[in-house]
Amino acid sequence: MVPGAQVRETGAPAGQHTANLQFDLMTGAVAGPRLGRLVTSRGEVATPAFMPVGTRASVKTLTPGEVKGLGAQLVLVNAYHLYLRPGGETIRAAGGIHAFMGWDGPVLADSGGYQVFSLARLCSVDQQGATFHSHVDGSVHALSPEKVMEIQGALGADIAMPLDVCVPYPCERSQARRAVELTADWARRSRTSVSPRQALFAIVQGSTYPDLRRAAARDLADLDFPGYALGGLSVGEPRPALYAMLETTLPELPVTRPRYLMGVGAPLDLIEAVARGVDMFDSVYPSRAGRHGTALTRDGPISLRAARFRRDFRPIAEDCVCPACQGFSRAYLRHLLVAGEVLGQRLATVHNLQFTLHLLADARRAIAAGQFDNWREVQIQRYREGKSTAAAE
Amino acid sequence: MVPGAQVRETGAPAGQHTANLQFDLMTGAVAGPRLGRLVTSRGEVATPAFMPVGTRASVKTLTPGEVKGLGAQLVLVNAYHLYLRPGGETIRAAGGIHAFMGWDGPVLADSGGYQVFSLARLCSVDQQGATFHSHVDGSVHALSPEKVMEIQGALGADIAMPLDVCVPYPCERSQARRAVELTADWARRSRTSVSPRQALFAIVQGSTYPDLRRAAARDLADLDFPGYALGGLSVGEPRPALYAMLETTLPELPVTRPRYLMGVGAPLDLIEAVARGVDMFDSVYPSRAGRHGTALTRDGPISLRAARFRRDFRPIAEDCVCPACQGFSRAYLRHLLVAGEVLGQRLATVHNLQFTLHLLADARRAIAAGQFDNWREVQIQRYREGKSTAAAE
């Protein structure tokens, strides 16, 4: 169904172990839906997996216990944000990111390359690294690939991302090529400075230029990283371009390594990316949508602030078992959100994270049962039809 | 120790039952510390009791289950706020305030007199009621005592407060006298229009004029309400004035009715008011202080945002069993609060509410053991000394 789905690398071992991360691929190949398992010293993660985002060592509004209760097995934090505040050495003194934030499961720490190139005011980028003004207080900082590995070592996350160069969309081919080259060079340097206790992923850039993406993937694949991320996507490009880049890039990556699509978390994108062979995702979409009053359902998103929910005493979704749906009505959530009560943002976040985590769990079940294509079709149709209905109301 | 503490009304029945509220006084008299129990159809409340404030049908940042888990037995909501948003009829349609907000224990609904006279822009007050501009959208509303009872009926709280006239501090004697007269008239009118399923308290006004307070208390006592509130205090008057008003007013109230001091919740004020015979309290102080980064401890309040907590990996209080102290360090809370993460506000709220609820539970134990005077002295000294130490650091 997806080009390359049948190209199984014969003889690839079922499980590959690097220093601190083992990835077992149970079902799947270089493309097409895959069922796997990440094994870390802090626990296992069933893939395809969605990682709730705890940028500043907190999944917004929730305790780690709640995040775990919703079914999350892996959370993401951001090295750029934590470097600026409270500082890597503070987290090292706490005993690492797990002890600091009270999450005892596996953690992936993004480098913050994306933030350096979007949130901060950039001064310069050269072979050495990036110099920028902090978005917090305007102070000037220089991050090199080595410096980021030092911060990553202080955080002590199970999976670490190297510093990469992110380009906006759209961008000139020359700019995209430059980003690919620098990112690859930085990945090599990161590899020599990463802590042996951390699994370092490589990041494939290349904007929406298929040949750049393909070349970047091949180059990095040769270096055999314990995992591969696709960066620079979900930054404003049309959906067909996103899907095309997945189809172009994923077959170039080693079948036995996990593939992580950065910044993707909307339901249809998750389904389409799983269909093409992605194993890991992170995105603020579910939690941010929740805080803004949008609840995700199998029948599309609904705006809880809408007047039609004023006296709607049903839960967000009748069949949902999340704590928000088990205890509270749409009318109450609407009231809280309209009044600006934090509990409304919190309950909508709870629902949306549970929805997203359960969507991936359903996808895993469908893959295991050999029913993924059918499941995908049903989910997409239902979501799209519900979305049109909601828009028409 | 407090004037009037020994004036026990001999022959007063141990428990007095009105339509929907029973108050059992186990220990105590017209003044001095009292140990009691409010019995409602939705559960019992040990007194002296602190009510967490859920102004807009939400104790800020927390679920009802969490509020219950912290030890709260009674919560407060505000009729003025809920009348404006989402509207009394919406809550009636939900099946009442308990069903709407998911709290199955007893609820006390303040009338919002205080809010009409402070938060809203007032147009006029006369015998009939108050006309004001909504603080939400500027729309003009008129509330009479009867209209407030209609809203209270829609909410269906177990205990309802009537519309009263609140005056600022300081205020002219003539203004205070007028507030007392109108409040008493409105209390009489509210009594004839309150739902028979709700217990209506009367509110004693009189600013800091002892004779006005005494006369107001006597007048309302003659009408035998199921409970009495002291309003118009904790509005900026010096602490000695607050305590003097308690000593003046409480001996005038029926010994067998619960006395509720509105708006008081700082630790030392709670202890001093219990010492003088108050049974019930509400205040945003613990939760608001928490949201602003102040944590309450037996050794005084501490500002969690202080730089000295940057690498302090101890909990707020070593001996505290609240979920915040059981799972998270001062350094982490400081980080969350400085970064503006809602979880920081939430955890500080959890700690401060638990602290306040436990303080009252300790007071009850001390009264029951006949050790209140000693307990009070130790607590106050420790809190004051710790406060000076913290300020000096």
Image (cartoon, coloured by chain):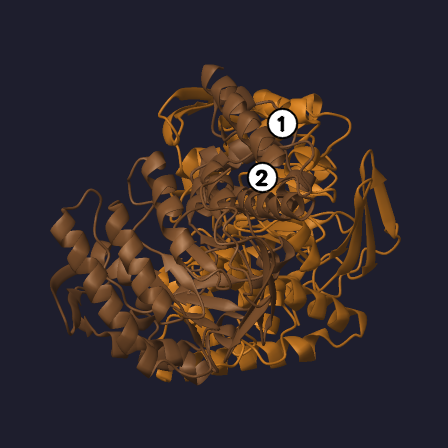
Chain colours: A brown, B orange
- The N terminus of chain B is located in which quarter? bottom right
Q: Quadrant of residue A326?
A: top right
Q: CA distance from mark 1 to mark 2?
A: 10 Å
Residue A32, position as x, y percentages in the image = 51, 46
Q: Secondary structure at mark 1?
A: helix
Q: Quick check: do tags 1 and 2 share a chain?
A: yes
Image coordinates for residue B33, horizontal then vertical, percent = 71, 64
Q: Which residue is mark 2?
A: B57
Chain holding disc 1? B
Q: Amino acid at mark 2?
A: Ala
Taking the image as shown, residue B169 lies to the left or right of residue A186, namely: right
Q: Which mark is residue B91?
A: 1
> Does residue A26 appear anywhere in the picture?
yes
Chain for disc number 2 = B
Q: Quadrant of residue B16?
A: top right
Q: How many dots with numbers? A: 2
Q: Is residue B102 above or below residue B265?
A: above
Instruction: Give A86 or A378, whichever is nearer the viewer.
Output: A378
Question: Which amino acid type is marked by label 1?
Answer: Ile
- Tell me, yes or no, whether the two marked residues, 1 and 2, touch with CB atoms within 8 Å: yes
**Circle 2 SS class:** loop
